[in-house]
Amino acid sequence: MEKLILVLNAGSSSLKFSLFSLAAAGEMRAAAVGQIEGLGTAPRLKVKDGAGERVADEQWDKSEVTGHAQALQRIAGLLRSRFQGSVLAGVGHRVVHGGPDYAAPLLVTPEAMRRLEDFIPLAPLHQPHNLAAIRAVQEVQPDLPQVACFDTAFHQTQERVAQFYGLPYEYFERGVRRYGFHGLSYEYIAAALPTVAPQIAGGRVVVAHLGSGASMCAMRDGRSVGSSMGFTALDGLLMGTRPGNMDPGIVLYLLQQEGMSAKQIEDLLYKRSGLLGLSGIGNDMRVLLASEEARARLAIEHFVYRIGRELGALAAVLGGLDALVFTAGIGENSGRIRELVCEKAAWLGIEIDREANEAGGPCISRTGGKASAWVLPTNEELMIARHTRQLLAL
Ligand code: ADP
């Protein structure tokens, strides 16, 4: 009987899923990919099959599907009818925070769930929803093995000295330290490099994951040695709606001088800043690139400026740079942003090949430059499926 692995990525108002088939030998294949968006407001399910053909597009009443558990039941029903004769062998979850404990994926047990709940304050906007999805699966099928894959785990190889903030030492012991995120994306890229770009796989590589959340990771020999994100996913680069690195004095100023509450500041930093806040137009890079507005240009310039700055810092951590890799929504699709970033990185020896960049890579730099530049699509879902398969010995 064909075995399947379900991969879930639960957000506050969304539930993304991919169903992987273990039928064929070798690499797993996604047999269905879908998402429910608008949970709590206007839930809508969209599903495509493995070939990218649409198999479902349904709008639901918000009173019928109120949370993750009901959303999951709907998805389970749809998948059951489409994949009759197959058996679901396990579920892999993206869980944003593994805290200081977990450097690898984990089979979910009641004890592990209790520990993962301890990390909710470290990622209050993501972790509760990730855990809610695990609980929802337990409700639907209690004996189904589940695996938690952490966005922080890949960065646990960083040297201890890189994990500190300059706060009193006891804060480090209480978990206030640099963790780094987007680890599943970086792990996927690190695993792909030996095949796709063997000449750089063992070298000093900075990967720029530029999506609606954005971060950069310095890798040596495929292992994380530095990251632009730290304690939370607010740090580092300018993002779609988050400001990235900023003076912590700003938070004090907002609290003390502007009288903002912690909740209001959270909303400002997670939802109203970044490309959206600077441009006043939106957080979609495509819209900003197409706009004639001065503030759209400013937002793009500042986005690129911050990538250049972070690249310099990470190259310093690595003691030089052999390659820069672009990935995620903006990194994979926007030749213009890649070009602007590479121009800023000329001092590191990157010479962009404009034709290759237009064509989308994979190598987008001229041979002979001291460092090369690449475009590699990431696949966090496949990474989670691989971990789940391995941990469950499927
Ligand atoms: P996430 O998974 O973090 O939601 P993605 O990696 O899918 O994000 O990236 C989403 C972002 O990618 C969108 O906000 C959009 O701005 C950007 N994007 C997608 N396609 C393009 C494109 N052709 N040009 C520029 N930006 C793009």
Image (cartoon, grey):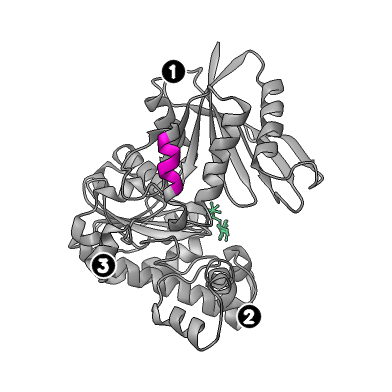
* 37 displayed left or right of 322: right
Q: Could you say where residue 306 lies in the image, as x and y percent from the top left? A: 40, 72
Labels 3, 1: front one: 1
Residue at 42% x, 19% y is 394
Q: Is tag 2's residue or tag 1's residue first in the polypeptide sequence?
A: 1
* Mark 2, residue position: 293
Type of amino acid under label 2? Glu
* 189 displayed left or right of 286: left
Type of amino acid under label 3? Leu
Region in magenta: 111-117
The vertical placement of 155 against 320, above or below, is above
- Real-space CA distance between mark 3 and mark 1, rounded to the nearest whole angstrom: 42 Å
**Cβ atoms under marks 2 and 1 closer than 8 Å:** no
Q: Could you say where residue 96 lies in the image, as x and y percent from the top left? A: 45, 49
Q: Is tag 3's residue or tag 1's residue first in the polypeptide sequence?
A: 1
Q: How many marks?
A: 3
The crowding category of the residue bearing disc 2, from other C-alpha atoms within 10 Å (few below 14, some 14 to 19, many at least 20), is few
Q: Which of 148 and 33 lies nearest the eye of the viewer?
A: 148
Label 3 secondary element: helix
The crowding category of the residue bearing disc 1, from other C-alpha atoms within 10 Å (few below 14, some 14 to 19, many at least 20), is few
Q: Which mark is residue 59?
A: none
Q: Is tag 3's residue or tag 2's residue first in the polypeptide sequence?
A: 2
Residue 9 in which image quadrant: top right
